[in-house]
Image (tube, rainbow, N blue to C red):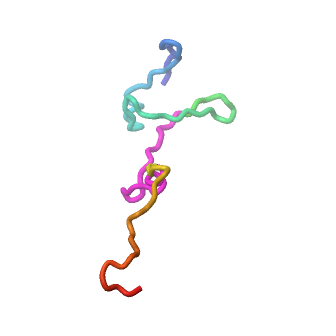
């Protein structure tokens, strides 16, 4: 398969044939990773893998990052509320 490098505004680009996009399960707007081979004689194009949460749950890193910087926990009150003996 051969294609031509074309100008789009201040950038250069190539068009990928529909059959190739279908084989890679890509749509318009898909994120791609570009890399040069070690000999710098070819460009490798790979789809960016989507980050999938573990077992469909939230990741602890994402939850902690979303917490306000001045957050103070006050969920637990350790005072007696009835006739508890500590």
Q: Is residue 19 magenta?
A: no
Give the quadrant of residue 58: bottom left
Magenta span: 45-65
Q: Hey, which residue is sitting farthest bottom in the picture? A: 85
* Place of residue 84 in the rendered image (x, y in percent of width and height, measured from the top left): 34, 85
Compared with 84, 13 (above or below) is above
The residue lying toward the viewer, choosing from 20 and 57, is 57
Position of residue 43 relative to residue 49, above or below, is: above
Q: Position of residue 66 (x, y in %)?
A: 44, 49
Which residue appears at 41% of the width and 63% of the height? 74
Q: Give the residue displayed 43% in from the left and 61% down from the top.
A: 73
Q: Is residue 7 above or below residue 77?
A: above
| Residue 13, percent from left and from top | 50, 19
Quadrant of image for the C terminus: bottom left
Q: Nearer the viewer, residue 62 or 10?
A: 62
Kindly identify the residue that appears in the image at 43 percent across and 44 percent down: 50
- Disc count in the image? 0
Q: Farthest right residue?
A: 39
**Left or right side of 35 for 76:** left
Of residues 73 and 17, the one nearer the viewer is: 73
At which x and y percent is residue 67? 44, 51
Quarter of image, res 41: top right
Residue at the spot x=53%, y=13% of the render? 10
């Amino acid at each position: 398969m051969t294609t031509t490098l074309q100008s789009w505004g201040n950038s250069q680009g190539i068009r990928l044939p529909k059959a190739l996009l279908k084989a890679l399960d890509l749509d318009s707007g898909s994120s791609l990773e570009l890399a040069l081979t070690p000999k710098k004689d070819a460009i490798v194009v790979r789809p960016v893998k989507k980050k999938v949460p573990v077992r469909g749950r939230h990741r602890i890193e994402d939850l902690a990052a979303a917490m306000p910087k001045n957050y103070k926990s006050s969920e637990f009150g350790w005072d007696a509320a009835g006739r508890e003996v500590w």
